[in-house]
Image: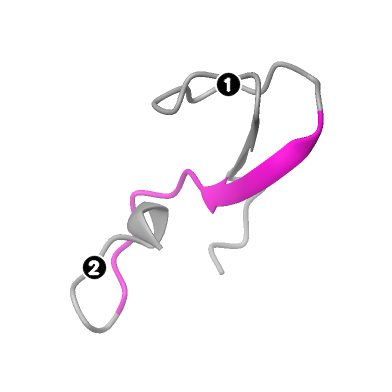
Amino acid sequence: MTGNDDWGLRSMQDDPDSDSWGGQNIFDVHSKSDGVALDGTKYSDW
C-alpha cells in the first residue's frame, strides 16, 4: 500500500491501544502509515 514496511502487530495480551507487539499470538495487523485513501480515511484506521 505504501511501499514501506509500515505494519503494526497486536496480540491478545497487548493493551487495546498499544502500538507495539508483545511477541505473542498475532490477532491484528494494521498499517502505521499516515497516508490517506481516496475516500479520505487514514490507512491506519482500516
Calculate the distance from the C-alpha at mark 2 to the C-alpha at mark 1: 22 Å
Q: Position of residue 37 (x, y in %)?
A: 31, 75
Q: Are marks 2 and 1 in contact (CB under 8 Å)?
A: no
Asked if the magenta segment contains residue 39, the reply would be no
Q: Position of residue 29 (x, y in %)?
A: 63, 49
The answer to whether residue 40 is above or below residue 44 is below
Q: Single out the residue that lies furthest toward the bottom.
A: 38
Kindly identify which residue carries mark 1.
20
Q: Amino acid at mark 2?
A: Thr
- Secondary structure of the residue carrying tag 2 is loop
Q: Quadrant of residue 25?
A: top right
Q: Quadrant of the C terminus?
A: bottom left
The answer to whether residue 46 is above or below residue 21 is below
Q: Quadrant of the N terminus?
A: bottom right
Asked if the magenta segment contains residue 28, the reply would be yes
- Secondary structure of the residue carrying tag 1 is loop
* Apparent side of residue 2 relative to residue 27 in the rendered image (left or right): left
The answer to whether residue 37 is above or below residue 38 is above
- Residue at 39 percent across and 52 percent down: it is 44
Residue stretch in magenta:
25-37
Q: Which mark is residue 41?
A: 2
Q: Position of residue 38 (x, y in %)?
A: 27, 83
Q: Amino acid at mark 1?
A: Ser
- Which is more N-terminal, label 1 or label 2? 1
